[in-house]
Amino acid sequence: MNTKTPFFNVAYRYGDAADRVIFPTFISNEAMTDPAMAKIAGSRFQKEHLIVDFGNLSMKFWHLKDFLRARNEIAVKQLKKNNLPRFVEIVNRLCFEAIQITSRISRCDSGGALAVYSAVYQHYKKLCTYAYTANLLDRNLTDMLRSDLASVLSDGSDIEKALLILTRNPRANFVYNHDLELIALLNKHRRAARTEVIFSGHAKRWVGLFCGGGSSIANKEIVWQRIEEFSDLSRGQLLAKRADIYKQYREAERGAVQLAKKLSLSKEIIAKAELLKDAILLKETRKLAMVRIDDAVNPVFEKMAVAAGIQAKNLKYLLPLETSSLLSRKKRSLLTDAFIDELKGRSLIVIKDGRSRRFFGDGFAQKIKALGLEEELTKNAAPKDDGKSSRVGEKAPRVYEKKGFVACVGRIVGPARVVLSPADFHKVKTGDVLVASLTTPEYVSIFDRVAGMITFDGGGLTSHPATLAREYHIPAILGLKDLDGVLSDGDLVEIDADNNKVTILGR
C-alpha cells in the first residue's frame, strides 16, 4: 500500500454492504477503541481506525504502531493472569441478557423499539470489549509460541504440526456442545414422554449454530431438524455419539501432553499454548453470540423500520446515532432508502475512542485524500465476484507461490467452490474444496461435505476456519489474499497443507 499513509490495511473483502449487520461490524470495532479495553485487556487503540465502503469493497484500516503495541501488551498481561475463561462466562451472560431485552419488543411502540435497540447495543458493545481480547491476542501469541518451538524443532513443518497439536481445543466446537446437551435431554426423557416443550428451550439456545442464512424462522427449523434426527436414534446410538465426542476431547488433551513431554517443553511454553486454547474458545463464543443476537434483534429492526418508513436491511446499515436521528421527527425525512443506497457506494466511518463518525459525498473524497488512501482504494477496487475468472479454460497447472497459514495438515485434490456467504451453500457438494473469505458459525452446516479449505482473508491459529478444519480433519490453508478472484467454481485445485502449497490444476 501507499507508504505515505499512517494506516495499515488489515482486512478487506467484497460484498453487498446492505447484507452486513451493524452489530458484528461497527460495534465490534468500536469496542476495540473503548476506554474499557485498557482496563480489561491491557491496551486500546489511541488513534482512529477506519471502515471504508467503496463500491462493493469493504476495507478496514488501523494504525500499525498502535495495533502491534496493543497486541503485545495484551499478550504480556494475559500470560501473567489468564482472564479468558472468565471472559467466556461474561460474554455468554451478556449475550443472554441482550436476548432477554429483545423479548420486550412485542409490547413496545416505535419509541420503545429504539430504547430496546439502544439497550441491546450497549450490551453487545460491552460483550465485544471482552471478546475482542482474543482477537488482539492470537497473532502475537502464535508468533511467540512458534519462536519457542523453533528452539527445540528445526524443521518448519514440524513446528507447524506441533502448534496445531498443542493448541487444538475441541471444546470450542459448539456442535459438540450442542450434541452433548441434546443427548442428555434425550436420555433423560423416555421416548414416549418426549414433547415439543421439553426441547423448546434447547432449540432457542442454539438458534444460529446450524443456520445457513435466511429468516429467523428458517434458522429455528434447522435446529429442530437436528433434534428430530437425534430423536430417531436408539439409546445405544446416542451413547456411541457421546462417546465419540469425549474421545475427541481426550485425544486432544493426550496429544498435547505427550508432545510437551516428548519435547521437554517448559511451563512457560505450555502456558502460552493453554492461553491460545482459551483464546480459541473465547473467539468462538463471541461469534456464536453474534449470530444469536442478530437473530433476536431482527424483530426490533422490523418495528423500527415500519416507524421510520425505511427497509429494515437499510436500517441495519446505519450507525446507532444515525438510527436515533432517523426516528426523530426533525430528521425523519432526510434519511431515505435512496439516500442510504448512496452511502453504500462511497462511505467512510472513522471510529475513535468508541465514537463513530461517517463521511460521505465531498466529505468522503476530502477525508480519503487527507489520509492518503486514494492509491490503496484504486489498487484494491474490484467488481463483485460473479463466479467468472480470466483463468476460465486454462489447463496448465499453476503453483500458487505465496504461503498462507496451515490450519490442518494433509493433502487433497478436489473442485473449488467459491462461497462468499450462506447464500452460496447450495453449491457445495461432497468432496469439494471450500474457497471462502472467512467462515462463521453458519458454515458448520456444510462441513460434513467439505474435503479441504482455502480462505483469502485473515485466518490465524485461533480463527473460526482453523477451528473447523482441525475438528473436521480437513487440509486447510488460510489467508491467501491474492487468490481472491483467481479461483472459480469448478477449478480443480490441490491443497498440500503438509508443505503449505496450493496448486491450481485447471478446469
Image (cartoon, grey):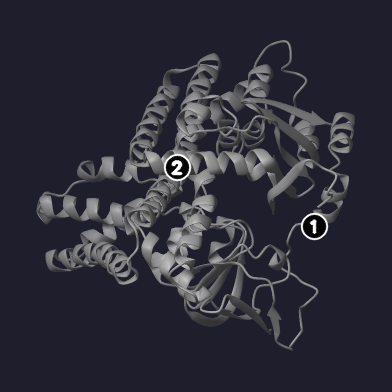
Amino acid residing under circle 2: Arg
Rendered position, 238 above or below 348: below
Residue 478: x %, y % from top left: 57, 64
Going from the N terminus, do you reach mark 1 or mark 2 first? Answer: 2
Residue 124 visible in this rendered orientation of the protein = yes
Q: Which mark lies nearer to you, 1 or 2?
A: 2
For label 2, count other residues whose C-alpha is less than 10 Å away and answer few (under 14), some (14-19) or many (20+): many
Amino acid residing under circle 1: Pro
Question: Which residue appears at 32% of the width and 69% of the height?
Answer: 259
Q: Is residue 195 left or right of residue 100?
A: left
Rendered position, 276 above or below 243: above
Q: Is disc 1 placed on a helix, strand or loop?
A: loop
Rendered position, 157 above or below 123: below
Q: Quadrant of the C terminus?
A: bottom right
Residue 102: x %, y % from top left: 43, 27
Q: Is residue 186 left or right of residue 84?
A: left
Residue 145: x %, y % from top left: 46, 58
Q: CA distance from mark 1 to mark 2?
A: 31 Å
Q: Is disc 2 placed on a helix, strand or loop?
A: helix
Question: Which residue appears at 78% of the width and 20% of the height?
Answer: 334
Q: Work out whether residue 415 or residue 259 is closer to the camera in this orientation and state it.
A: 259
Question: Which residue appears at 47% of the width and 28% of the height?
Answer: 126
Q: Is residue 316 left or right of residue 430?
A: right
Q: Are marks 1 and 2 in contact (CB under 8 Å)?
A: no
Which residue has dot 2 on it?
A: 286
Q: Work out whether residue 44 or residue 395 is closer to the camera in this orientation and state it.
A: 44
Which residue has dot 1 on it?
A: 383
Question: Which residue appears at 31% of the width and 72% of the height?
Answer: 262
For label 1, count other residues whose C-alpha is less than 10 Å away and answer few (under 14), some (14-19) or many (20+): few
Residue 414: x %, y % from top left: 56, 81
Residue 449 visible in this rendered orientation of the protein = no
